[in-house]
Amino acid sequence: MNEIKTGYVPNEVYKVEQFGNSWKLIDTAGNKVGTLGATTLTRKNAFNEGKAVQAYVMKNGKKVFKKVDMDVYNALVIPMNTDNGGVQFEDKGDHTTIKDFIHKGSIGLKPTELVMTPLKWKYLIRSAVRAKNIMMTGPAGCGKTMAAKSLVKALDRPDFYFNLGATQDPRATLIGNTHFDKDKGTFFSESAFVTAIKTPNAVILLDELSRAHPDAWNILMTVLDGGQRYLRLDEAEGSPIVNVAEGVTFIATANIGNEYTSTRVMDRAILDRFVTIEMDVLDDVQELGLLKFMFPEVNEDDLKAVSEIAHHTRTQSMSENGKLTSMVSTRASVEMAGLLYDGFELGEAAEISIYPFFSQDGGVDSERTYIKQLVQKYQKDENGEPLFNDVDENSNEENEDGIPQF
């Protein structure tokens, strides 16, 4: 009769991650393997305590799972896979692996529609792998949120989204609320944010951080501090705290500048807790490439008109003596191209999607009139000819910016 070998099974060690209301096991290759018979209580307690679980064979031959230190799991983790996404771990004995992933493997994970330099994409990947707090800055509509979501998809991490610019009650959003129930009495209901920070290797997007209430910044101070990484549930001394789980990455988006009147001047102590990645404003060639990728069925000349109109507004708005105070964002130009795809004419698409961003103050000298004249330069008649070819020579002179004067 074969003697049963009791004890821990060396290679059956798993990390626990929360998915909704369940807790699943992750093997050392980063694969989700379900529960494998580990009890809900064991999985939940291991997750809350930051421990792993390991298979254990009892005297009767039955296999159960027991909590073990995370170091047992980490010691078995394979080098990170550079072929595709997945939860990444560093092989502590070989730094080459992580460098290869950042500089080679990550390039293929960048979606084509995200216009971002390879250098900045690699820095974004590296910052996430190193669990840094990342601040994405740049004008509205330039792709900050898209870049953050692309990172989540590329790395296949658990992800959570919080729009801090829209919340009116930072404490309820970030901590939770106290409720009263006639059967339960008074009880505390933790927020989705608390759940998020307890999820190992999660990517947490803090959208519109520059529009957040200062109370939100105060709550986040200890959460974002690399030396602390905890959230206190109450201001009273001795109140419970929630530690930020291992590998959690925070990505914030912010519009920083005088032109963003609804934003607040961010606390320097908050800014110092982030590494900053500035999203670039696209030029007309980059914009055309993006629009052609997204709407290949639309006439290229029309897409070129959209990209040139957008580029002209950006040049003017960023010039010291420019005639515009606002620009057509990439988000707006994509919307305009989408209207063309759905059968709208160029002038109609412009009227709907970009004219509202420009002031009518000043009448014929207003920014709105300037934009209309810019769009008219690209409009065509039913025969595909420029709309203003037949305008009297003296009344069709162009100003120094290339805009027809009427």
Image: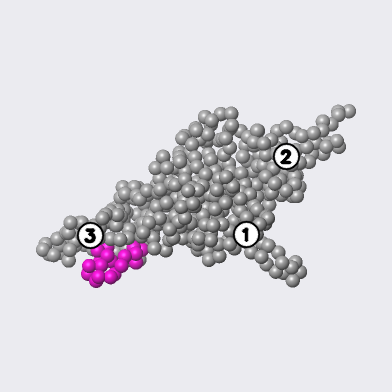
Which amino acid, mark 3?
A: Lys
Q: Residue at x 76, y 41 (%)?
A: 66
Kindly tell me whether residue 199 is visible in this rendering.
Answer: no
Image spot of residue 52 (x, y percent): 69, 41
Q: Which residue is mark 2?
A: 68
Q: Residue at x 45, y 40 (%)?
A: 122
Q: Residue at x 32, y 60 (%)?
A: 326
Q: Which residue is mark 3?
A: 377
Q: Secondary structure at mark 3?
A: loop
Q: Secondary structure at mark 2?
A: strand
Q: Earlier in the sequence, mark 3 or mark 2?
A: 2
Q: Is residue 173 above or below residue 112?
A: below
Which quarter of the rendering shows the C terminus? Answer: bottom left
- Mark 1 neighbour density, 10 Å: few (under 14) some (14–19) many (20 or more): few
Q: Secondary structure at mark 1?
A: loop
Which amino acid, mark 1?
A: Glu
